[in-house]
Amino acid sequence: MKTMKMKKWATLGVALLFGTAVFAGNYEIDTKASHVGWHGKKVTGEHNGAIEVKDGSLAVVDGKIKGGTISIDMQSITNEDITNEEYNQKLVGHLKSDDFFGVETYPTASLVLTDVKMSGTNYTFTGDLTIKGITKAITFEGTSEGGNDGLTVAGKMTIDRSDYNVKYGSSSFFDNLGDKMIHDDFTLTYKIVAKK
């Protein structure tokens, strides 16, 4: 009798294990279909642009996001609001320089999800964000849609650049900046498309 019960529980355990494996899978991020936009403000105005997703994947179980990693190509930063080509490239060059993101030394930024909470199609993500070699925890919101073959998750995150030693024009590092001050917080608006 004991042997039969043990076999029954062992069979159930195997079924659960392989059942979970069937539903679990990595959804590779479609870098061409995905989009990340940035928006920063200063005392005298604001700027916005885009940045490309390099690679990444989402861990999905039964259609629900459980984790994931994403890598951002910091060398792909563009500006979308300055129409004058000379000034546009001047700003982009400054953002790529050591004053800001130092893309020659730190060509990528990354996010590793460490906790995911879901309510309906709404997510609260917590992860380790690495910029300029510095890793800090960040929590942000998102929503998802999709089916068994893939999904799209979209939302916005606010990042405090002073946490990542991005000092230029920051009142966290310098006094008496006046109208040269650039706000520490900037936002990333994202749409990530992942396919099975």
Image: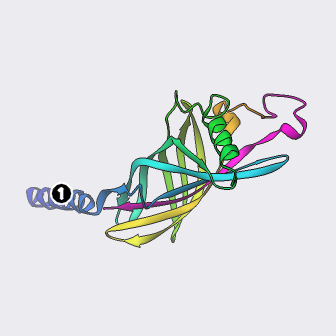
Residue closest to the eye, 111 or 125:
111
Horizontal arrangement in the rendering, residue 96 relative to residue 179 (left or right): left
Report x, y in % for residue 132. 57, 31
Q: Secondary structure at mark 1?
A: helix
On the question of residue 13 being in view, the answer is: yes
| Up-down relation of residue 150 to residue 81 (above or below) | below
Q: How is the image coloured?
A: rainbow
- Asked whether residue 190 is drawn in magenta, I would say yes
Q: Residue at x 11, y 58 (%)?
A: 7
Q: Quadrant of residue 125?
A: bottom right
On the question of residue 111 being in view, the answer is: no
Residue closest to the eye, 9 or 118:
118
Q: Quadrant of the C terminus?
A: bottom left
| Up-down relation of residue 106 to residue 110 (above or below) | above
- Asked whether residue 138 is drawn in magenta, I would say no
Tell me which segment is drawn in magenta.
Answer: 171-196
Residue closest to the eye, 174 or 93:
93
Report x, y in % for residue 117. 52, 58
Q: Quadrant of the N terminus?
A: bottom left
Query: So how many labels did they put on this image?
Result: 1
Residue closest to the eye, 140 or 92:
92
Q: Residue at x 34, y 66 (%)?
A: 62
**Badge 1: residue crowd in 10 Å (few <14, some 14–19, many ≥20):** few
The amino acid at mark 1 is Val
Report x, y in % for residue 188. 61, 52
Q: Quadrant of residue 138?
A: top right
Q: Provide the residue designation for mark 1.
A: 14
Report x, y in % for residue 123. 53, 62
